[in-house]
Amino acid sequence: MSEAIAHLQAAQAQAMAGRPRVGGFPYLAETLRSVGVTRNVWQLPACQSLYLTDRGAVLQQGTPLVSGSVDVPRFDQSALIQALRTDQAGESSFPAFLLAAWNAGVIHYDVDLFERRVTYYGCDGESYVEHYPAVSL
């Protein structure tokens, strides 16, 4: 196992152990940021996550949301915002959030951990940007 993978996995475990139920994403993001993660890029519906770190890039492959040929949902910013607010309130699991984002037409999203900004993208160039707050660990 590389140093980049070991550091990332340790930070993820630490973040999940201390993550509050409500508003957990900023805590996770700050934990990752504190160990040198600069960006996290998710591809949906593949559930493939690329972490760019100061120790190297790490790709994690999750369980895809769909298989085979599927129609891509139209980008629906209102549905995306609803999915975000539900997740932020601690009322959904992360897999449920990913599925809701996909159903809202998100094909990938990019987390900039230094700017504390997440940009969600649709397949026709649509995007929605949301900033998240800094938190203390």
Image (spheres, grey):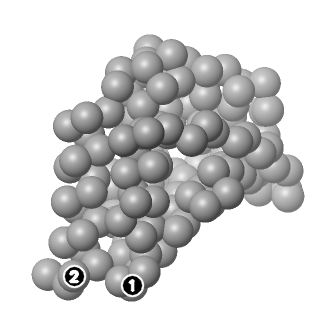
Please report the residue visible at 43 percent of the width from the left and 20 percent of the height from the top. 22
Q: Residue at x 29, y 65 (%)?
A: 8
Q: Given the current orientation, which residue lies at the most extreme front position? A: 136
Q: Local crowd at mark 1 within 10 Å, few (<14), some, or many (≥20)? A: few
**Along the viewing direction, whichever of 88 and 20 lies nearer the viewer:** 20
75 or 77: which is nearer to us?
77
Callout 1 touching callout 2 (CB < 8 Å): yes
Helix, strand or loop at label 2? It is helix
Residue identified by numbered label 2: 3
Q: Earlier in the sequence, mark 1 or mark 2?
A: 2
Q: Position of residue 6 (x, y in %)?
A: 19, 72
107 relative to 23, above or below: below
Percent position of residue 57, x then y: 41, 80
**Residue 56 numbered tag:** 1
Question: Which residue is most to the left?
Answer: 1
Residue 51 spot, x, y in % from top left: 44, 69
Q: Is residue 44 left or right of residue 20?
A: right
Q: The N terminus lies in which quarter of the figure?
A: bottom left
- Horizontal side, residue 13 vs residue 47: left or right: left
Q: CA distance from mark 1 to mark 2?
A: 8 Å
Q: What amino acid is labelled 1 in the image?
A: Gly
Q: Is residue 109 above or below residue 131?
A: below
Residue drawn at (71%, 27%) of the image: 81
Q: Is residue 46 left or right of residue 126?
A: left
Q: Quadrant of the C terminus?
A: top left
Residue 47 falls in image quadrant: bottom left
State whether residue 102 appears in this view.
yes
User: Residue type at mark 2?
Assistant: Glu
Question: On residue 78, which mark appears?
Answer: none
Q: Residue at x 52, y 68 (%)?
A: 38
The quadrant where residue 2 appears: bottom left
